[in-house]
Every structure is written in structure tokens, then in C-alpha cells.
Amino acid sequence: MKKNLVIAIDGYSSCGKSTLAKALAKKLGFIYVDSGAMYRAVTLYFLWNHIDVNSDEAVTDALQHIELNFHSRDYESHITLNGEEVSDEIRLMPVSENVSEVSAHKIVRHEMVKQQQRMGKSKNIVMDGRDIGTTVFPDAPLKLFMTADPKIRAERRFKELESKGNNQTTLEEVFENLAHRDYADTTRKESPLVRADDAIILDNTNLTQEEQLEFALERVTALLPQS
Ligand code: DC
């Protein structure tokens, strides 16, 4: 049996990881997994249920009551939390403001990594996140590490929020939130955001989505056996 292929895409917040990962998965016929959505959905559950992240016991117990599932419709990934569609709600500020703390928790990470590794066991997948190439799939044959100018990133996320009808958040707030999450992601103790030694850097500050896809596809082609 042929071995399945895992493509790992990591990088800073709002760098366009999911846009590229989705396009790549669509082009290759792979499954797209948004690992950030999992941490966001756990955060939403913690907010809804007033879970104290400082209590390991409360966190362990809460995780046992969380079931996450992805449903893919035309390569847009939708996530359900205990059967409830939460794809839009997990993108809003209350979750964005609390997800760094929740995702830094050792017990939360342990559980999410276990579930992510299961998804990549037998299927061809493109997974994006912060620790995919370093912790979740350290043997992935293709790893991309994405980065872009922080101002451009804030503008992109701001426009995305606006297009979804969210006019309560200012550009400055989005910028501050990204800066905070970059800091928290790169300095946390548990699997911080770092570039894997064998990850290829993709700075997309001045690249179109098509150019990024082309860049990634060239790397994928180089991996496949020539016929
Ligand atoms: O990709 P995103 O911005 O939706 O991710 C939300 C948060 O989840 C991000 O601030 C850091 C965390 N995260 C993580 O710690 N590890 C991952 N593999 C994916 C996301």
C-alpha cells in the first residue's frame, strides 16, 4: 500500500495559512485540516462553561465532554462542537482573545495533538497550525513556514471580519490581538511556534494567492515520483 502524504503549514497568525492550505488541498484532492479551529472550539467551550484554565482537573474533565468534528463542504472546513456548528463564532474576538491562554495549556495540547495525528495516519492531508511540522508531524515530507508583514496581516484579518458583518472590532484591536498572539505563540513553554529546521519559508507579504499556490505546488511536484 502506498504511504499517505502529509503537508504541514505553520506560521504566524493571519498569514494566509488556511487560504493556501485549502487551495492546495483542493488542487491535490487532499483533506484540509484547520488545527487552529480545534483550539478555538475548545476555547469557546471553556468560555461557555466558565472553565478555569488554571485548574488541571477542570481542564481534564472539560476535554472529556468535548467532541470536535470537521465537515468539509467545497473545501471550506466547518467544525462542530458537540454537534453544534461553531465555524463563525470561533472567529470572533471573545475566542481570539482567550485562545492563546487555552492553547498554551499542556493538557489541551496533548489531547489536540493526539486527535490531529490520528487524522493524518492514513489519509492525504494538508494541516495548518503552529506546531504541525515540529510536533504533530515532524516527519512530514513537506513543511512550509509562512510569514508576512504584521500590518498587512492585520489588514487582511480586519477585512475578513468586516466581510462577515463584524463592525465592532477596529483595525487597531485586530493588530494588537495579532501581536499578542504572535508573542504568546512563540514564547509559550509547550511546543512554541518555531520554524522546523527543514521547513521552507514562504513570506507572502507581496505575493498573490495564485503565486503562493504555485510556490507550494512546485514543492509538492518535487516530492512525487517522476513517471
Ligand atoms: O490559526 P488560528 O489563528 O485560527 O489559531 C488560533 C490559535 O490557536 C492561535 O493563536 C494559536 C493556537 N494554535 C496552536 O497553538 N497550535 C496550532 N497547531 C494551531 C493553533
Image (cartoon, grey):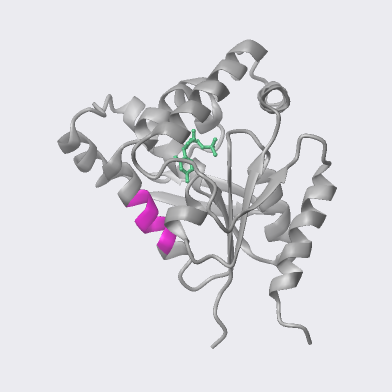
Displayed quadrant of residue 25: bottom right
Which quadrant of the rendered structure holds the N terminus? bottom right
Give the total of numbered labels: 0
Task: Point out the residue furthest to the front here.
Answer: 197
113 part of magenta stretch: yes
Residue drawn at point x = 54 percent, y = 80 percent: 3
Image coordinates for residue 163, horizontal then vertical, percent: 72, 25
Residue drawn at point x = 71 percent, y = 57 percent: 24
Q: In this view, does 157 lie above or below 15?
A: above
- In the visual, does 211 lie left or right of 44? right
Which of the two residues, 22 or 77, is positioned nearer the viewer here? 22
226 part of magenta stretch: no
Residue drawn at point x = 77 percent, y = 34 percent: 205
Which of the two residues, 209 or 70, is positioned nearer the viewer here? 209
Image coordinates for residue 106, horizontal then vertical, percent: 29, 42
Q: In this view, does 59 lie above or below 109?
A: above
Which quadrant of the rendered structure holds the C terminus? bottom right
Displayed quadrant of residue 46: top left
Displayed quadrant of residue 8: bottom right
- Please state the extent of the stretch shown in magenta in the rendering: 111-117
Task: Report the predominant secondary structure element of the magenta stretch.
Answer: helix
Image coordinates for residue 221, horizontal then vertical, percent: 76, 70
Image coordinates for residue 65, horizontal then vertical, percent: 27, 44
User: Is residue 29 something one can see in this rendering?
Assistant: yes
- In the visual, does 62 lie left or right of 78? left
User: Is residue 170 something one can see in this rendering?
Assistant: no
